[in-house]
Amino acid sequence: MEALGVVVALVALFGVTLLVMAVVGTVKAAKAVAAKVDRHSANAQRAMENAALKAKSIARPGEQGRIAALRLSLRTALDSTRQVLQAGLQQDGQLGDALQLLARLDSHAAELDAELRMMEREPTSGRVAARLPDLRERVERITHSANSLRWAAQDRMRRFADDELARLGKECQDEAGALRHWTSAEPAAEDGTDAPGKASAATSTEEPADRRKGLGTGRSTSAEDLLGLAAEPLSRLADRLRKPNPAGPNRS
């Protein structure tokens, strides 16, 4: 019974663990989807606001149109710089510092955009005309700072791309040289000297001629030498054979 209770407890614990993991995964997925939707909604809303500001800068004359143009230029500079820095952050981590500076510029730009929005609703044209130069100067300072960050990031990306392309071109040239480095066969000697193979062949052809001189010796061998009669001349042998036998012929 105790073993059965332990098994049931383990099964229940495993089921609770699976349930908790499923809940946590569902919550994380829901948060990710919500964040993505919010991000897209914010981008869509900002795009609509920029389109409205562009329409106001064209349609409205006077200070109202100029204020709309200032707000549009401020937003355009910040948005363009943010897109460039975020796109290059994956390849260059140093752009993270530039993004932090851009975030600080965003806070100042948000305050300035709020003031410009209030000036759009200001009924007194004299007050708007008095505040407009100061507002334009602040907008230019923020946009210049944002543009400087964007231009510097673009120059940095282009420089890195040029360096990488030059390095890649050098590696390709080295590899091409290595592929062309092959060893060709040495041509045969043409100065009249015999190759080692020819010399050995000539020696082998001449060797049997030397061996024909008396069974491997360096001199010729006569029939007398072969029969062992070289010590006694052939004439003396003939004289001995001609002498008569003193005992005479055998008689039967």
Image (cartoon, rainbow, N blue to C red):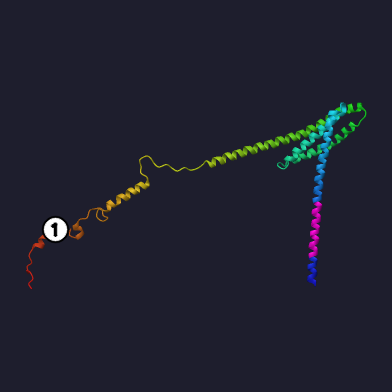
Residue at (82% x, 52% y) in the render? 27
Q: Is residue 48 left or right of residue 237?
A: right
Q: Determine whether 193 is above or below 211 in the image.
A: above
Q: How far from the left and from the top, in percent, is residue 216? A: 27, 55
Q: Which residue is mark 1?
A: 234
Q: Main secondary structure of the magenta part?
A: helix
Question: Can residue 36 be spotted in the picture?
Answer: yes
In the image, 94 versus 197, the foreground residue is: 197
Residue at (14% x, 58% y) in the render? 234
Residue stretch rendered in magenta on the structure: 11-28
Please tell me in which quadrant of the rendered image residue 13 appears.
bottom right
Q: Determine whether 61 is above or below 243 in the image.
A: above
Residue at (80% x, 53% y) in the render? 26
Looking at numbered disc 1 in the image, what kind of residue is underneath it? Leu
Under circle 1, the secondary element is helix
Question: Can residue 108 be spotted in the picture?
Answer: no
Q: How far from the left and from the top, in percent, is residue 105? A: 81, 36
Q: Quadrant of the N terminus?
A: bottom right
Q: How far from the left and from the top, in percent, is residue 15? A: 80, 62
Q: Residues within 10 Å of mark 1 (few under 14, many from 20)?
A: few
Residue at (27% x, 51% y) in the render? 210
